[in-house]
Image: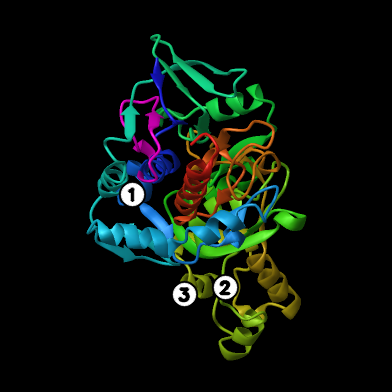
Amino acid sequence: MTETDVIILGAGAAGLFAAGQAGQRGLRVALLEKTDAPGKKILISGGGRCNFTNLGAGPGNYLSANPHFAKSALARYSPADFIALVDKHGIAWHEKTLGQLFCDGSAKQIVAMLRDECPADRVSLTCDVEISQVERGDDGSFTVTAADGRIWRAPALVIATGGPSIPKMGASDFAYRLARQFGLKVVEPRPALVPLTLGDEDALFRELSGVAAPVLARAGAGKRKTEFAEAALFTHKGLSGPAILQISSYWRHGEEVGITFLPDAASDWLIATKRDRPRTHLRTLLRERLPDRVADALADRLGLEREIGNASDKELRAAQVQLADWRFAPNGTEGLAKAEVTAGGIATAELSSRTMEAAKVPGLYAIGEAVDVTGWLGGYNFQWAWASGFACAEALAAASFR
């Protein structure tokens, strides 16, 4: 049996970072990973360059049953803090759009940095650990038993195994099963940042597979209602691209999605064009602003084939309205296999926002994607991993078992 101060389950972004922070504070950490290597999701993120944070990351960029939960951790470990760490390790980076930061080189540099941040004499990383049992003793200590018989025991246990998105990378619902074992509630998990699928009524748009266009996309109802102005990509199954992935976190089955195809157009742009260019066709106007295939598909659906000067203002206004709020009725998503993250998770009502510790189970912590805090596309989920891992490590260092 290995006796240690802290057992961290999961060597992804949150687990690796928390292990390093805890080890630097003098704690002995057993970091256990199910797969054969740490940081596998990090390696495939950002097209292999890791979108490791976002300059604008703040509480408003996260979806949770408690929108205030992330405030404390995000305030105490900011994007600037992680950038300083990246700079300390000499990793070159660049900003793309909307505050997204990527490595100039490879995501491997971030994984190497996180491993280097783990003191060798304090943090023990063990991979290929298939956990068969987790127990809490009468003394409050946690015992983790592997399928091969290896055993670890510590007064603190951190759940950092993420959610079940991208199961081919070893992801599972282990975090939720473990949380329920200890009596913690779980907000229903679902795919997030995921492509949406369309039914037969939108079949025409499947012919646009591979074509992207800048749009304003809307989804959600009530407090979930939101919109994103980015690119939408048509696929053979439905809709994808940054704008769609973003709103997928807010969409629910049975709801519609609204797309504005010309987000920069004035409200009465067709009426004004009718006065200035009466002999122009709608198809031509759309081709001036959108990819040809998208313009043709929209023109076919709208059915205004004559010169716009021969169309009534009522017809043109109807076309303007539809182009400003084209309604799609997704019949689902491409599921956890294609979801970048999982929304939902261990209920924030069960955890301290300051320490990430479970109120009902002293010594039990949960961080990263395992928790019901889901960020937007663009580095926000990594920033939550760093911030929640930092908050947890600080709490562990101050814990009474020391």
Q: Nearer the viewer, mark 3 or mark 1?
A: 1
Sequence order check: which comes first, mark 2 or mark 3? 2
State the predominant SS element of the stretch in magenta: loop
Image coords of residue 291 (percent x, y):
44, 65
Q: Mark 1, residues whose alpha carbon is within 10 Å: few (<14), some, or many (≥20)?
A: few
Is residue 168 or residue 329 the one in the foreground?
168
Image coords of residue 238 (percent x, y):
54, 45
Q: Is residue 39 magenta?
A: yes
Marks 2 and 3, how far apart at CA: 10 Å
Is residue 205 or residue 59 the one in the foreground?
59
| Residue at image mark 1 | 47
| Residue at image mark 3 | 288
Q: Amino acid at mark 1?
A: Gly
Q: Secondary structure at mark 2?
A: helix
Image coords of residue 318 (percent x, y):
72, 70
| Residue at image mark 2 | 282
Is residue 227 or residue 147 the one in the foreground?
147
Q: Is residue 193 magenta?
A: no
Q: Is residue 54 visible?
A: yes
What span is in magenta?
24-41
Marks 3 and 1, how far apart at CA: 31 Å
Sequence order check: which comes first, mark 3 or mark 1? 1
Q: Is residue 232 visible?
A: no
Marks 2 and 1, how far apart at CA: 38 Å
